[in-house]
Amino acid sequence: MRGAKIPHETIRRLPLYWRAVNFISAENHAHINSKVLADVVHINPWQIRKDLSYFGTFGTRDIGYDTKKLLQKISDILRLNINQKAILVGVGNLGMALLKYSRFKSYRLDIVAAFEKQRQKIGKTINGVIVEDVSKLNELKGRGYYIGIIAVPAVAAQDILKRLVYSGVYGILNFAPVVLEAPKNVTIINIDIALGLARMPYHMSVKQMEKR
Amino acid sequence: MRGAKIPHETIRRLPLYWRAVNFISAENHAHINSKVLADVVHINPWQIRKDLSYFGTFGTRDIGYDTKKLLQKISDILRLNINQKAILVGVGNLGMALLKYSRFKSYRLDIVAAFEKQRQKIGKTINGVIVEDVSKLNELKGRGYYIGIIAVPAVAAQDILKRLVYSGVYGILNFAPVVLEAPKNVTIINIDIALGLARMPYHMSVKQMEKR
């Protein structure tokens, strides 16, 4: 069964390869070897070769990987070749940016519905999507939406997750700055925009000390 | 010298602890033990104790950590107790949301200047910050700004980094979907909002298969 023995860290790196090979392929390079890819993504070439080897042998020693085939292969593994529809909850500043974010399309993701609590935003159309009252979230059950994006404040996030899961969602992209509880079959990917920033001053000061 | 022997992964987890203890402290809990914290952040209690032990012993076996002291300690380690000023480059949808993003303030980060290429945005004031012409970026040298936030398209990001570094920036929060090259003394933290999404369909399908 595919997927069963592949390390989480390999799956974590694949999108990075996919993104890089996409750029390289846009520059009309027919082939790419692991060394060139390594330079772009800052990951060891042997690590790249090992990661890709989980999915069969599809590189040639001297000329490297066929960029188109490699893209296709990674897309297949990550299932990025299927159109996905997502529901957004929370149309604050971040939610608004997410609604307008063009790069979700590269991953074949379309935000098809958006929900918000604040009255003055309900009814507005943003990037073709009408903002609906969050109380209507429960009516989504059975409509076949499997991906939910949470962009509400931390205190509201757990309740929204519960309601999304009730509606049939089992993949959650969580932008709320809190670790959420979910049933085992639900995948949660957390993105806290500010959290990465919290490591910055530490690393900056360590690097400055090393410089001296 | 502090910092030298602390694993990168520990530093990566500290902001997560800090965020969680902040929430707990807001609920007026005077103490927290590693088990409770573990439940909140979904990390093993022994891992938490080990991470915190790098910075001295400041928990008590029976009552746990004093939440205020723990917050202070993590802030000290991460240097979150110092006000930081940042420059934003790129005021598209994402940059706009970042300018308005209130949570940067929890990390004592203030965006004090913003730069953009598109003429129609230059001169506008967003959340108290006037959007300036990106060509003026080079004039920042010597003004004492050390943190730069890159929110421009991937193709422009490397050039912006170069100019930020020239201006004296040595900490970069990069939202452009590309791995950037920088001098060794520069810290780059990458946040690609869509990249996390790329792992989602894979994990979702694996979990669904496990369920059967």
Image: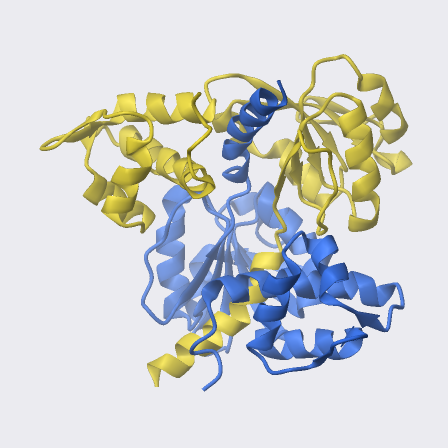
Chain colours: A yellow, B blue
Q: Quadrant of residue A198?
A: bottom right
Residue at the front extreme of this rendering: B62
In the picture provided, is B24 more to the left or to the right than A27?
right
Quadrant for the N terminus of chain A, please. Answer: top left
Camera-nearest residue between B110 and B182: B182
In x, y percent, where is residue B5? 43, 76
Q: Position of residue B61 (x, y in %)?
A: 74, 76
* Residue A162: % across, % down: 81, 33
Q: Is residue B186 left or right of residue B113?
A: left
- Up/down of A181 relative to B56, above or below: above
Q: Residue at x 47, y 27 (%)?
A: A106
Q: Quadrant of the C terminus of chain A?
A: bottom left
Image point (61%, 58%), residue name: A195
Q: Nearer the viewer, residue B168 or A157?
A: A157
Q: Is residue B131 visible?
A: no
Residue B119 x, y percent position in the rendering: 52, 46
The residue that appears at 33% across and 31% down in the rendered structure is: A54
